[in-house]
Image: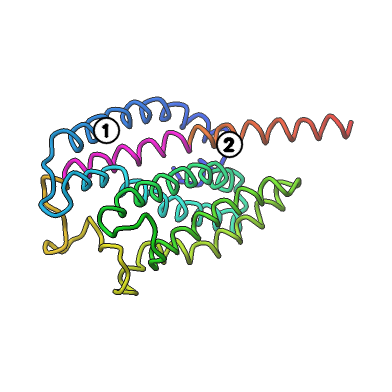
Amino acid sequence: MSLWEYANPRRFMALTDRIVGPAFVLSGVALAVGLIWGFFFTPDDFRQGSTVKIIYLHVPSAMMAINIWVMMLVTSLVWLIRRHHVSVLAAKAAAPLGVGMTLVALFTGAIWGQPMWGTFWAWDPRLTSFLILFLFYLGYIALWAAIEDPDTAADLTSVLCLVGSVFAFLSRYAVNFWNQGLHQGASLSLDKEENISDVFWIPLLVCIAGFVLLFLALVLMRTRTEIRRRRVHAITIRERAT
């Protein structure tokens, strides 16, 4: 069976109807386990003290903020190349979730940064590119709302997504490009010298799994809503024409 078969709205709706519920349950379990484990059963860091525990919210939300835009990029490319409505509706459904994740990452980063850097905000390359990514999220949503024709809106927002991907890339790799920035390196790394201790790493992975599953459940649910909205719109136009 080809993956493209699920670009058919009926097949997509039938498949996701069986996925959304379990995804919500699994995300709730993973988040509960990860956050309780991380906040209550891990020690304070020898340098950062108890503030290090913000990592269980900040790192997953920051990762999701960037990767949601990557997901939007892929689905937008599918729309531009193959004109599958489900793909661009998935991108539209994901954008508000990306805004939420970016806000959580910016807010928790400010809380974490104040005791470490002595300020809630610095025009660090990674922080600045992350803020610009947040503005691109807002612009993407606003562009959908501003254009009445759905296909025209899909085309223009897909192009905007391509441009915004530059800042998603910079948000992920700015630390590697500009070593003078305040922001620390990656918390999760294949390099044992840079990777965090296992006592923090394992519950962090559980939290990340919870965030991924929560996003999956929410984006599928919102995409299903967008498909229904598109159907209602099509019926309304047909009725007006007759």
Say whether residue 212 is magenta: yes
Determine crowd level at label 1: few under 14, some 14-19, many 20+ residues with C-alpha closer than 10 A.
many
Q: Is residue 187 left or right of residue 173?
A: left
Q: Residue at x 54, y 47 (%)?
A: 91
Which quarter of the picture shows residue 163? bottom right
What's the mark number on residue 9?
A: 2
Q: Are marks 2 and 1 in contact (CB under 8 Å)?
A: no
What numbered label is drawn on residue 107?
Answer: none
Label 1: which residue? Answer: 30
- Foreground disc of the pair 2, 1: 1
Name the image quarter holding the C terminus: top right
Q: In which image quadrant can residue 128 be found?
A: bottom left
Give the quarter of the figure containing the N terminus: top left
x, y percentage for residue 204?
22, 44
Rendered residue at 69%/51% (across/down): 153
The span from disc 2 to disc 1 (Cα, nearest Å) is 30 Å
Q: Which residues are magenta?
A: 202-219
Q: Nearer the viewer, residue 3 or 121?
A: 121
Q: Secondary structure at mark 2?
A: helix
Graded by Cα atoms within 10 Å as few (under 14), some (14 to 19) or many (20 or more), the crowding at tag 2 reads some
Q: Residue furthest front?
A: 118
Q: Residue at x 44, y 59 (%)?
A: 130
Compared with residue 52, is residue 234 higher up or lower down, i.e. above or below?
A: above
Q: Majority secondary structure of the magenta segment? A: helix
Which mark sits nearer the N-terminus, 2 or 1?
Answer: 2
Kind of residue sitting beneath label 2: Pro
Left or right of 87? Residue 56 is: left
Q: Answer left or right for 190 relative to 139.
A: left
- Magenta segment: does it hold 13? no
Q: Amino acid at mark 1?
A: Ala
